[in-house]
Image (tube, grey):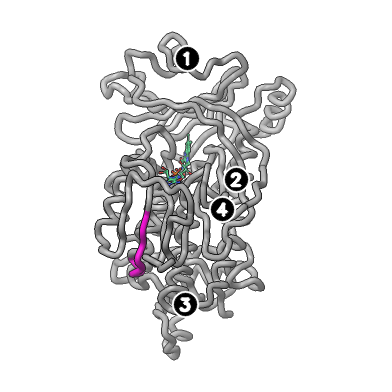
């Protein structure tokens, strides 16, 4: 069959829409399909991190997205039922290492609308909404990427093998719109709260504006169909709010899964996002992982299609990304074990662990798995920070979407490679890692360093 476009993307959720934007920036032709006309309306992601905002920057959408989302300096706290804090993820005030705040809160349908609207910038992108792909034989493209979510059709065509990381648990997820004049709503915590109550574990998230998220674990005897009935729902959160303080905007029951697929590529078929991994949302990182997939894949597809790189480059996609995302999912599962403990013996063991005081954790700072560089130790395979340059621009604005060399001025002034040179940038960071210059990939991960 004649290739109609460079890349066909099945699924225009957040990951497919971002990938299409990145491919559009690279000048590729793309057909993107979604069975639905509208973006998904049920409550899902509310948080992304600074690296993901940096990827939106690469897609040319950071300003619009920053205007629609709330940066948060408050972090997350895990409390036992007595109100004692047992575990903390510290927030960061102001821009972090990625050049943006480290945590952003948002309304997923609005983010997806912005990503879809971004596609209208590119005449090389055709968006086909209301078009269900029943078989990949329908598609005529050089490469097909399945961004088609947890029940992926493309995954079935690849024949991936599922690795189960151990957690599957139903939760009720509710978005509330609070009355701005309610004193109880005003008194809600600004940080995210994991309420580790063995009688009823829950999560509270300050989303943005009047919107608050409650995630409530289902307990034995719960009828999932009836949990949002007023007589059942409001007593569960009576310690914070009642029907006079807020109204339910939307609700859904999900089973939170922790799975990773083996087999993200077969020939010209690829997977990204929930199609190849799912995590419980305790770190707010499921969609973030899919955005990192898109960022890793986009420059490799562009290098193959536009610059004639070998398509063996695509074999580095899963080998780099799978260990990275697995680290995030494994941490989310460990946090889930803290939150979801209901068995008295397990709860007693948990409480004993924290008697010495509060423990802290952060998002993993993971290294990519072996890929473009199989042999290079860290900091190769780590994301390079994004400093602000002396002229006020963020570093990535100066580089554009290509390879760059950053480092000590004295070293770089004599080099004239076909890459951007940024003397003086990141020298301090490099010195801390025992290096004097770094070669950055278009996705800003470090290809290698020079000592
Ligand atoms: C309660 C909850 C809270 C969460 N919180 C967070 C959070 O705070 N932070 C975070 O990063 N992540 C979070 N997540 C995870 C996040 O929502 C998902 O990881 C993300 O939506 C996955 O995006 P995706 O594009 O891969 O898949 P989806 O969003 O599932 O999109 C897949 C798209 O493919 C389309 N499609 C499927 N099959 C076909 C077909 N055959 N033909 C055409 N179209 C098709 C679907 O219609 C859909 O639009 C949360 C999830 C849940 C459930």
Mark 3, ligand 1, within 8 Å: the answer is: no
Residue 186 in the image: state x and y as whole percent: 33, 24
Residue at x-position 34% and y-position 72%: 398
Name the image quarter holding the N terminus.
bottom left
Q: Quarter-wise, where is residue 141 in the image?
A: bottom left
Residue at x-position 60% and y-position 45%: 329
Q: Is residue 388 visible?
A: no
The residue nearer to you, when weighing 341 against 219, is 219
What is the number of the mark on residue 226?
1
Task: Look at mark 3 in the image and give the residue it sits on.
Answer: 407
The residue nearer to you, when weighing 448 against 325, is 325
The magenta segment is: 25-32
What is the number of the mark on residue 329?
2
Residue at x-position 46% and y-position 29%: 204
Q: What element carries label 2?
A: helix
Residue at x-position 34% and y-position 30%: 211
């Amino acid at each position: 069959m004649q290739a109609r476009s460079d890349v066909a993307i099945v699924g225009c959720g957040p990951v497919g829409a971002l990938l299409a934007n990145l491919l559009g920036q690279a000048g590729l032709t793309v057909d993107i399909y979604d069975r639905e006309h509208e973006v998904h309306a049920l409550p899902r992601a509310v948080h992304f991190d600074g690296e993901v905002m940096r990827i939106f920057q690469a897609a040319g959408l950071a300003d619009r997205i920053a205007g629609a989302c709330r940066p948060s300096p408050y972090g997350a706290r895990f409390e036992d039922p007595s109100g004692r804090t047992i575990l903390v993820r510290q927030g960061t005030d102001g821009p972090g290492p990625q050049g943006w705040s480290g945590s952003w809160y948002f309304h997923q349908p609005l983010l997806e609308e912005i990503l879809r609207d971004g596609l209208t910038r590119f005449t090389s992108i055709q968006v086909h909404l209301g078009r269900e792909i029943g078989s990949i034989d329908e598609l005529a493209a050089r490469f097909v990427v399945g961004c088609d979510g947890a029940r992926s059709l493309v995954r079935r065509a690849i024949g991936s093998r599922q690795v189960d990381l151990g957690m599957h648990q139903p939760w009720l997820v509710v978005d509330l719109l609070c009355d701005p004049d309610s004193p109880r709503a005003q008194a809600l915590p600004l940080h995210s709260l994991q309420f580790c109550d063995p009688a009823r574990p829950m999560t509270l998230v300050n989303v943005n504006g009047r919107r608050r998220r409650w995630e409530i674990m289902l307990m034995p005897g719960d009828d999932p169909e009836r949990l949002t009935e007023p007589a059942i729902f409001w007593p569960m959160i009576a310690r914070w709010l009642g029907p006079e303080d807020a109204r339910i905007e939307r609700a859904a029951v999900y089973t939170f899964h922790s799975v990773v697929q083996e087999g993200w590529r077969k020939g010209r078929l690829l997977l990204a996002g929930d199609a190849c991994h799912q995590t419980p949302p305790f770190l707010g990182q499921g969609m973030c992982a899919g955005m990192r997939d898109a960022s890793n894949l986009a420059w490799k597809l562009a290098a193959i299609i536009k610059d004639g790189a070998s398509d063996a480059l695509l074999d580095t996609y899963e080998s780099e990304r799978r260990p990275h995302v697995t680290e995030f999912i494994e941490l989310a599962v460990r946090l889930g074990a803290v939150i979801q403990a209901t068995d008295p013996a397990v709860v007693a063991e948990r409480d004993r662990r924290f008697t010495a005081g509060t423990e802290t954790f952060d998002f993993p700072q993971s290294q990519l798995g072996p890929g473009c560089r199989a042999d290079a130790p860290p900091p190769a395979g780590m994301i390079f920070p994004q400093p602000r340059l002396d002229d006020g621009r963020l570093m990535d604005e100066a580089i554009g979407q290509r390879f760059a060399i950053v480092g000590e001025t004295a070293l770089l002034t004599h080099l004239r490679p076909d890459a951007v040179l940024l003397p003086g940038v990141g020298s301090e960071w490099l010195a801390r890692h025992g290096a004097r210059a770094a070669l950055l990939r278009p996705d800003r991960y470090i290809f290698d360093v020079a000592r």
